[in-house]
Image: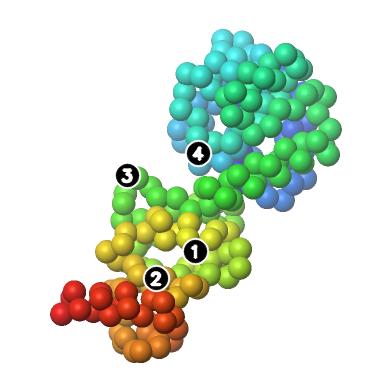
Amino acid sequence: MNCIIVEDEPLVRKQIEGYIERIPYLHLVGTARNPIIAKAILQTEVVDLIFLDIKMPQMSGIEFLQRHDVFQQVIFITAYPEYALQGFELNVTDYLMKPVTFERFTKACEKAKVKICGSLTVKNNLEHPDYLYVKCDNCLEKIAFVDILFIESMLNYVQIVTTERKYTVYSSLKAIKERLPQSLFLKIHKSYIVALNHISTFGQSQVLIAGHKLPISRRNLQTIKQYLTNIQ
């Protein structure tokens, strides 16, 4: 997960940087001594998680969240417990009191990880609807819809197979399906979604895509027959 630190105290920033280095799934992409600098970072970097101080010069962390559309997960880090209720009213992920222990810091990051993986693993770039964005190896990968051959469910993961490579993404098949254009993709099995344009052969029990034989479930067979009827 890409993260930034917004904190006006250098020693606290250094401590949080050290904690982030110890957690394998966190990647620090920037630090800021106030929310104004943080806003500039958010405009240029892909960020999943913000470690945000509350009392800072020019603008508080709470004011920052109130004035801007912040879609990232936010963990407050502060010395002032009286702001806890207001923080949670802003739907922050967690609220850490200074001095922050590594154990407590890790628990907060785990909360953020669950939320991010559940809702942001797979994204559409709304400005470019011909592409799907997926989180893979701590970065966002842009995949053109036309390059996707099929998508296979693998327990808590899905594997997106394209004409060039495979992407393993922490997500459900349902979450992926909701972000794909229905005109281009079809679910043929509880474990498979296929790209219609890449199907070379339809059978009663399987389809053939770029040499891959993929099963058709009985439940989805009628849907596929209906599709074939519509394109004839």
Q: Nearer the viewer, residue 124 or 142?
A: 124
Amino acid type shown at disc 1: Leu
Q: Mark 2 or mark 4, which is nearer to you?
A: 2
Q: CA distance from mark 1 to mark 2?
A: 10 Å
Q: Earlier in the sequence, mark 4 or mark 3?
A: 4
Residue 156, percent across and down? Answer: 61, 63
- In the displayed structure, does residue 71 sit left or right of residue 146? right
Res. 151 in view: yes
Q: Give the residue number, with chain letter if any, for mark 4.
A: 45
Q: Which mark is residue 187?
A: 2
For marks 3 and 2, the one nearer the N-term is 3
Q: Earlier in the sequence, mark 1 or mark 2?
A: 1
Label 1: element kind:
helix
Q: Are marks 1 and 2 in contact (CB under 8 Å)?
A: yes
Could you tell whether 63 is left or right of 184 in the image?
Answer: right
Q: Quadrant of residue 230?
A: bottom left
Mark 4 or 1 closer to N-term? 4
Q: For residue 230, which numbered disc appears in the image?
A: none
Judged by depth in the image, the label closer to the viewer, 4 or 3, is 3
Callout 1–callout 3 Cβ contact below 8 Å:
no
- Sequence-first disc among 2 and 4: 4
Query: Which type of secondary structure does the marked residue at label 2 adopt?
Result: strand
Which residue has dot 1 on it? 173
The residue identified by callout 3 is 127
- On screen, residue 208 versus residue 32, left or right, reads left
- Write the residue at 52% across / 47% down: 120
Badge nearest the viewer, 4 or 1: 1
